[in-house]
Image (spheres, rainbow, N blue to C red):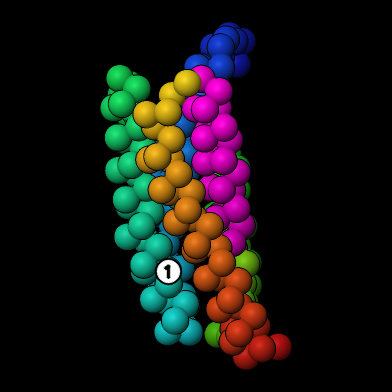
Amino acid sequence: MGLFTKDIKTMDDLFTHTLRDIYYAEKQIVKALPDMIEKASDPQLKQGFQTHLRETENHVKRLEQVFSVLGQKPQGVDCPAIDGIIKEAKEVAGEVDNKQVLDAALIAAAQAVEHYEMTRYGTLIAWAKQLGRNDVITLLNQTLEEEKATDKKLTSMAESQVNCKAA
Ligand SMILES: [Fe+2]
Ligand SMILES: [Fe+2]
């Protein structure tokens, strides 16, 4: 995508662009999660991040399947949004000097990531329906459901234990 060329002309192009965006984002999340696993103190949170790392590796593979169904080569495109969310998470984590407060900060950062993913998959599913690409909806939906479940788990961990230990 060039600065002076308008490469996105159709909804199909826009769909592909957004697919490449989330493909890049999922790969960045795979790279970021090990650091979050290491920083987490609460055993349940650590375990939750570990589980989601494995799920995220699978999200990358699912997207590769989507590209393949569409007859396209898997390709990423820079996603400044996810880069920003991850950068901010690292910066905040670096400023926190208390393990319990750090756990609360990690959960907040992880939920920002999950919500970003949820908007992308939600949009892709809506566009796939509109474009008559029902063949990729199931794959996209499986991932969306895992993102939603992760977000819910993070909320319950925060509200049931992490936030009160930190406060
Ligand atoms: Fe994901
Ligand atoms: Fe996720």
> Height in image: 140 above or below 6?
below
In the rendered structure, the answer to whether residue 11 lies left or right of residue 141 reads right
Given residues 3 and 28, the one toward you in this image is: 28
Measured along the vertical axis of the image, is residue 33 above or below residue 21? Answer: below
Residue behind label 1 places its C-beta within 8 angstroms of ligand 2? no
Three-letter code, disc 1: Phe
Q: Residue furthest right?
A: 167
Q: Which residue is depicted at the point 40% across and 63% down?
A: 52
Q: Which residue is mark 1?
A: 49
Say if the magenta span includes residue 93.
no
Q: Which residues are magenta?
A: 109-131
Q: Residue 55, position in %: x, y? A: 36, 57
Residue shown at 35% from the left, 32% from the top? 66
Name the spot of residue 155 as percent of width and height, x first: 60, 71
Q: Residue at x 55, y 85 (%)?
A: 99
**Residue 101: quadrant of the picture:** bottom right
Q: Main secondary structure of the magenta part?
A: helix
Q: Secondary structure at mark 1?
A: helix
* The image quarter in which residue 160 lies: bottom right
Total marks drawn?
Answer: 1
Which residue is more in the foreground, 3 or 146? 146
Residue 26 seen in this snapshot: yes
Please tell me whether residue 128 belongs to the stretch shown in magenta: yes
Q: Measuring 59% from the left and 87% from the top, which residue is drawn there? A: 161
